[in-house]
Amino acid sequence: MNSTAVNLKDVTVLYCEDEDDLRTVTGDVIQQFTKKVFLAEDGKVGLELFKKYADEIDLIITDVNMPEMNGLEMAKEIKAINYNIPIIVATAFSNSSYLLEAIELGIDKYVLKPIDIKKLFTVMKQSLLYHELQDLYRDNFTRLPNRNALIKQLKQESPSILALIDIDDFSTLNELYSEAVGDEILLAFKEMLEESFPKDEYGIYRVGADKFAILAKNSDMLQNELKVKCENFIQIVDTNGATIDNNTINFAITVAIAKTNNHKTYETVQRVLGMAKSKFVQILEYDKDTHDTHKNFEENMIWIKKLKEGLTDGHFKAHFQAIVHSSTQEIYKYESLIRYIEDDGEVISPYRFLPIAKKAKLFNGIIKLMITECLNFIRGKNTTVAVNISFDDIKNKDIYAYIINLLEENKDITHQLHFELLETEEIEDFEMVRKFIDDVHKYGCQVGVDDFGAGYSNFNMIEALQVDFIKIDGSLINSVDVDETQAIIVDTIAGYAKRTGIKTVAEFVSKESIYTKIHELGIDFAQGYYFGKPISYVEVP
């Protein structure tokens, strides 16, 4: 029965009564107003029927005094199987000891005998509705309050302080040990939480399959106080793990902590947990300046709208930065760099919008626009230009096909187009990248590796891909004039490149002393603000 509106016609009842006539008469009446009735003459038969038809039975009505097994004994056995099943006790006595025992068992309703049928139906509806509402706010497996209960509680509290705890790679635990053991881990974890966070000081909630929340009842508690408490709990988990059938199962957890003065503490702590996961830190506190979710959300939505419209209304434009010969300082080629141009002419750098574009699945349009702009630049300026491309772009069949089609349509100028393979992520498939390089080489394009010396780049990769040039990462160039270690690394890269016939480019050349040093080290080309900032198409001579 799933409807929140109680309809007895949808309900299957188990009715236990040892008096034959009463069982028959009352059972017949109940049958007229419900879906189905199972009749039992005592608690033992009732328990057997429940075990057999547990998936069907929605409600139990039972007498207390019965042979073999009385109603409360049966109720205790049934509650052990399904604690949430509604049970109504019918008794001839309003005995307080009976009622106390019934309450302890989780029985929430009773009727006096002789049974008033109209009152019985009222009690049945009340009991079913009560349990349905309880299910809305309770996790049936752990019997902890659930996410709905937490949200409801947070709406009543301001400020509030909350910790969100995630069991790392819980699906892997299920696969490794079985889902049954996974369930045991959850129950053991619940007990660990209850031992570490006393119920008079904290509320514990299960808010997801592998996520639990800890709400401090003292809203004046400082974030750092809860952080210390959570750090101690992390230590307990790391040291002890969970003991299942005398076996210790080790696992890790990630914790996020947030305190806010509004009703969005849960939303905030979820964002902090995501950041903790992305940064691979075990515990992270909310910081308003960096985790302002409302501000981030609004800015993200603005940029998503700009991204969608900008790809068609001309707001996205390529800018071009000169790359010069180190020996002569004459321009050899340009690198194309995406920019967003505001209506007032303000030029926005890509760090403001590229991460959002990738997350919103809008980056495909940007890379296509950039390659098109580069070919238009070559045709209009008759000079060589380089465009950045990532492994994600190469493995995208749509982008790959788009690039090859454009090259085919512009074969007369493609020898002036260079690709710089970004080192922002590990290359998963060298054969795929190698094929891309072979395909664009057919059109006379050159391919290089950007940011060499950072990320995942190494000499073996250069050898495997057979690239045409290496762009040395700016982190190795920006202090090469004063840092001897950086100079040695750059010298090593330059020496390797010369032996293998690969050209080298130094980026982030921002001043004369850096230029002088990279020239001494034999770097072939240089790029940076010392030679000029990125400029628009019309500014390129």
Image (cartoon, rainbow, N blue to C red):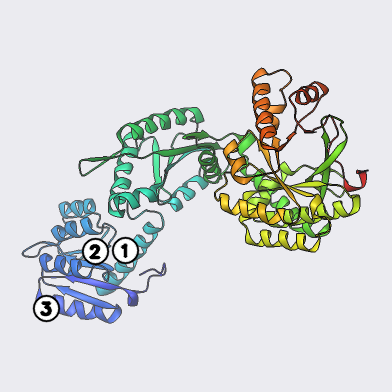
Q: Kindly identify which residue carries mark 3.
A: 21
> Residue visible at 32% across and 69% down?
122
**For marks 3 and 1 on the same chain, the one whose residue lies earlier in the sequence:** 3
Amino acid type, residue under disc 3 in the picture? Asp
Q: Which mark is residue 468?
A: none
x and y percentages locating residue 322 in the rendered image: 84, 38
| Residue 387 x %, y % | 75, 48
Which quadrant would residue 486 be assigned to in this image? Answer: top right
The Cα–Cα distance between marks 3 and 2, rounded to whole angstroms, is 20 Å
| Crowdedness near tag 1: few (<14), some (14–19) or many (≥20) residues, C-alpha within 10 Å | many
Question: Does the residue at mark 2 contact the one at mark 1 (Cβ under 8 Å)?
Answer: yes
Residue at 75% across / 27% down in the picture? 522
Q: Residue 47: name its quadrant.
A: bottom left
Mark 1 sits on what residue?
127
The kind of residue tagged 2 is Ile
| Image quadrant where one finds the C terminus | top right
Disc 1 is placed on an element classified as: helix
The three-letter amino acid code for the residue at tag 1 is: Ser
Horizontal side of residue 112 vs 18, given as left or right: right
| Residue shown at 73% from the left, 35% from the top | 504
- Camera-near label (3 vs 1) is 1
**Label 2: element kind:** strand
Q: CA distance from mark 3 to mark 1?
A: 26 Å
Q: Is residue 239 visible?
A: yes
Camera-nearest residue between 175 and 460: 460
Q: SS at mark 3?
A: helix
For image coordinates 25% across by 79% down, the residue present is 31
Residue at far left of view = 68
Closest to the observer, 422 or 225: 422
Residue 88 tag number = 2
- Residue 115 appears anywhere in the view: no
The residue lying toward the viewer, choosing from 382 and 38, is 382
